[in-house]
Amino acid sequence: MTAQTPLLVTFAVYLAAMVLIGFVAWRATRSFDDYILGGRSLGSYVTALAAGASDMSGWLLMGLPGALYLSGVSGAWIAFGLIVGAWANWRFVAGPLRVYTERTRNALTLPDYFTHRFDDRRRVLRVLSALVILVFFAVYCASGIVAGARLFESVFGVPYAQALWWGAAATILYTLVGGFLAVSWTDTVQATLMIFALILTPIVVIVSSGGLGTSLALIGQADPLKFDWFKGGQLGAIGVISLLAWGLGYFGQPHILARFMAAGSLATIPKARRIGMTWMILCLLGAMAVGFFGNAYYAQHPEQAGPVAENAERVFIALAQQLFNPWVAGVLLSAILAAVMSTLSAQLLVCSSALTEDFYRGFLRPKAGQRELVWVGRAAVLGVALLAIWIARDPDSRVLGLVAYAWAGFGAAFGPVVLISLFWKRMTRNGALAGMVAGALGVMLWKWLFADTGLYEIIPGVIAAVVAIVAASLLDRPPPADVQARHEQVRLTLKENGY
């Protein structure tokens, strides 16, 4: 039996299980509502872990450990921003969005919600928001495919061009077949696998380096700046603010917001928030510990540091292979695949819903039957996946860079629009349009013209969107009376339920 056999077996078993779940979900998918939102039937546990797993992509097990390995504790600012942003998203957006989307003609997608929230009979909001989803998710999906390709490239030694297809194939299959239920059920399994890997691996790394005290001493001897939160002055105020600002992105991520929309009821949200935040904090701490204490292990074993010296984002992969029995390593590395697949599948499904619900049914076939819409949705999943593979074809692509740009795009284009629409009844359709355009353009222009300032583009994008929303809404005539009345009804329902 070769050294690769355990990895092949564990990967094969894991992938087969995910595909099997997809086919089970296929039998439970009877309508387009089921395919896109699972019939709004998710309980607290599945809602929490599905939201978490679809949020924490391959970035969690590759990009974040790589950042801590290179920068030390100064790379942890991003985690603080994410924790605060995720909690605020659960607390202030999840419940209101769940109620509002049900009251606005049972909206299935974010563009659908915008259209009915602002009574946009010209459907300009639907088209614009669907275009934003397709543009930024093409990049976001590419980041997942890059992470999967890196995994197969590192573990099995296959060329990057071939690894692209290996990494994406199973995800495409179960998303294609099972839709939202498959994605949510597999997310729950994948989230469990991820937290297991991220609790076990740092413990073994620390023990293998001689314990906590020895590990910290080794890191301090190798590079004292690893303990400096400001990296010896290299990370200034702009750098810290930019890392913390990642938390702003949560309010506009369609694949996370879709989990809130699919919750079984408003009552499931508080429990889901507690489960989801606990899972997230433990996973982030584990991922950071793997990268940070990887420095101690490789200070003792420099001869094993080759793969990490070439690409720091491989630190989790390298440590799993070097420290664990091949069978255990196979399970741990499956966690990376789980992280990649959970986010990629959620993103593919949102793109599919935008193409099917917001373009195909919205403009081409308003009276299309449920079966027809499901099959169009499946075709859309395949089409977006192929586009993402094409974008990811560059072997020099970095996971964190791709994620950062797409995260900023959604956070600025949708975040202020979603948040303000849930709380301000005076907001108008033109305000939403102005905010969406200003946010998206703010991110793209800043990235293009001012990237050398070091300021994360989500910050100017969000500021531009908020100003545009408020200004355009106040200059516009007030929303129709029925729109304002519905808003009051939603707020009353939320107040009665403790929101």
Image: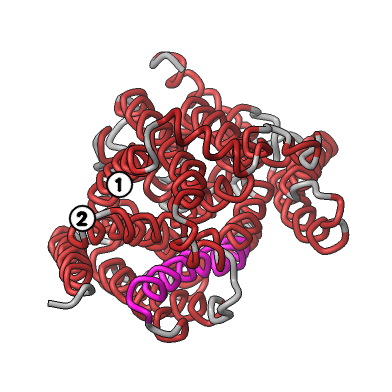
Q: Most prominent secondary structure in the magenta stretch?
A: helix
Residue 385 shown left or right of residue 190 in the figure: right
Q: Which mark is residue 328?
A: 2
**Sequence-wise first label, 1 or 2:** 1
Residue at mark 1: 197
Label 2: which secondary element: helix
Label 1: which secondary element: helix
Tell me the residue at 47%/30% (across/down): 96
Q: Nearer the viewer, residue 75 or 227?
A: 227
Q: Position of residue 76 (x, y in %)?
A: 58, 37
Q: Is residue 34 visible?
A: yes
Q: CA distance from mark 1 to mark 2?
A: 10 Å
Amino acid at dot 1: Ala
The answer to whether 483 is drawn above or below residue 498 in the figure is below
Q: Is residue 126 visible?
A: no
Q: Nearer the viewer, residue 203 or 15?
A: 203
Tell me the residue at 76%/60% (across/down): 444
At label 2, counting other C-alpha atoms closer than 10 Å, the crowd grade (few under 14, some 14-19, many 20 or more) is some
Q: Which mark is residue 125?
A: none
Q: Nearer the viewer, residue 499 or 242?
A: 242
Q: Is residue 145 magenta?
A: yes
Residue 10 shown left or right of residue 486 in the figure: left
Q: Is residue 384 magenta?
A: no
Tell me the residue at 51%/62% (across/down): 308
Tell me the residue at 37%/41% (across/down): 202
The colour style of the image is secondary structure
Q: Position of residue 483 (x, y in %)?
A: 58, 35
Q: Which residues are magenta?
A: 131-157
Q: Position of residue 474 (x, y in %)?
A: 81, 34
